[in-house]
Amino acid sequence: MSHFLPKSIRDLIEEFSKLPGVGPKSAQRLAIHLLHSPDSRVEPLGRAVLGLKDNVIFCETCWNIAENNPCIICCGEGRNSEIICVVEEILDVVALEKTREYRGLYHVLHGALSPIDGVGPDQLKMTELFERIGKGGVEELILATNPSLEGEATALYIQKHLIDSPVKITRIARGLPVGGDLEYADSVTLSRAMAGRSEF
Amino acid sequence: MSHFLPKSIRDLIEEFSKLPGVGPKSAQRLAIHLLHSPDSRVEPLGRAVLGLKDNVIFCETCWNIAENNPCIICCGEGRNSEIICVVEEILDVVALEKTREYRGLYHVLHGALSPIDGVGPDQLKMTELFERIGKGGVEELILATNPSLEGEATALYIQKHLIDSPVKITRIARGLPVGGDLEYADSVTLSRAMAGRSEF
């Protein structure tokens, strides 16, 4: 860190550098950009950071972040409460909501099973999921964990746990991403795409 | 913007999105990352943003940002006040200081001449530069503006303005970046590298 820069700027560069995906050069650029910005741009950012956790709670039904409990999705009109989509993270809900097609509810696990990282079912909202299903009223459970080793293991764990349950359990399709190129697809994805083929 | 996210989170995503080089997806990731971070990580960032401009002034000699006037470089021990390096931006000073080789002073123009953007000499710290040189005591002026159209024009403007001055005017070398590949260098850079060759 350049010692000749004013302390307030060095502080901000340091804090920016701690953010994921922000290297020291980007942190410098961001800090100097803000320095050149009017206060009307800088202050809202500072206040938004400090106020981030204000009024933010977890919905105790789906465990998504929310302002109310149950959240706006869980008590939303026109949503089908018979379908629950299980995802790993909050941002997965954001991504799925953006499609504007899914009208069921969610369940956010807050991670995936990963014994090597010490993440077992107890570290996830797994018990809460099974209790929720145990209450009845659920027809389909869509396992939308990531198509990674951990995500697949998590999906398998849930499926095995509910094997005697009458709930229909589905897994999101794995295949070629739209706009992707078959030639560059890895062989596991390609195998999945072939196995999951549907009638034209 | 996903309407179901709490307002405080949407606010922060929006503010992050306004930063240069931060797209909507990165802004989301940053906001959710902070949401999962302890307050001991979030608060220093917020306070650093709000306090960014505290005690930051411009050195009225070199026009770099500083806490004192003249700044720590301008009144620094062991610095050669007979050499002034002219740069466009504050971050250029940071980059040059990092080399730990240059021991002269600086002059930050805060931009480069760009008629198309309405930037003339009056929008830069140009008069201040000429006044500073007029006071005497300067032996060499290193023009370290960017090797871009605007940077070259700015260097040329300064050189022409000081053509009758006894001050030695030099331009930083343009050539192949160290670690670069001759094969991929553009032809202008290559021409410069050839023209600027030195004895081995």
Image: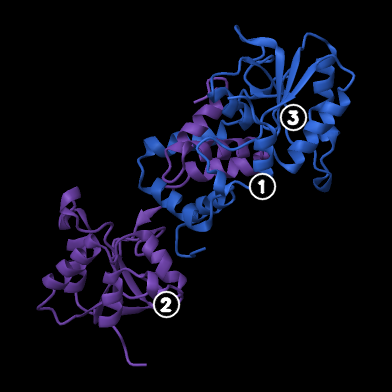
Chain colours: A purple, B blue
Question: Residue lying furthest right in this view?
Answer: B164
Give the residue displayed 19% in from the left and 80% down from the top. A167
Q: Position of residue B99 (x, y in %)?
A: 54, 24
Secondary structure beneath disc 2? loop
Looking at the rendered structure, the kind of residue marked 2 is Glu
The answer to whether residue A6 of the structure is visible from this angle is no
**Callouts 2 and 3 in the same chain:** no
Q: Position of residue B68 (x, y in %)?
A: 65, 16
Residue B109, numbered circle: 3
Q: CA distance from mark 2 to mark 3?
A: 59 Å
Which residue is under mark 2? A77
Label 2: few (<14), some or many (≥20) within 10 Å?
few
Q: Nearer the viewer, residue B105 or A139?
A: B105
Q: Position of residue B5 (x, y in %)?
A: 45, 60
Q: CA distance from mark 3 to mark 1?
A: 29 Å
Q: Nearer the viewer, residue A102 or B185?
A: B185
Which residue is under mark 1? B187
Q: Is residue A181 above or below residue A40?
A: below
The answer to whether residue B180 of the structure is visible from this angle is yes
Q: Is residue B159 above or below residue A184?
A: above
Looking at the rendered structure, the kind of residue marked 3 is Leu
Q: Position of residue B86 (x, y in %)?
A: 72, 25
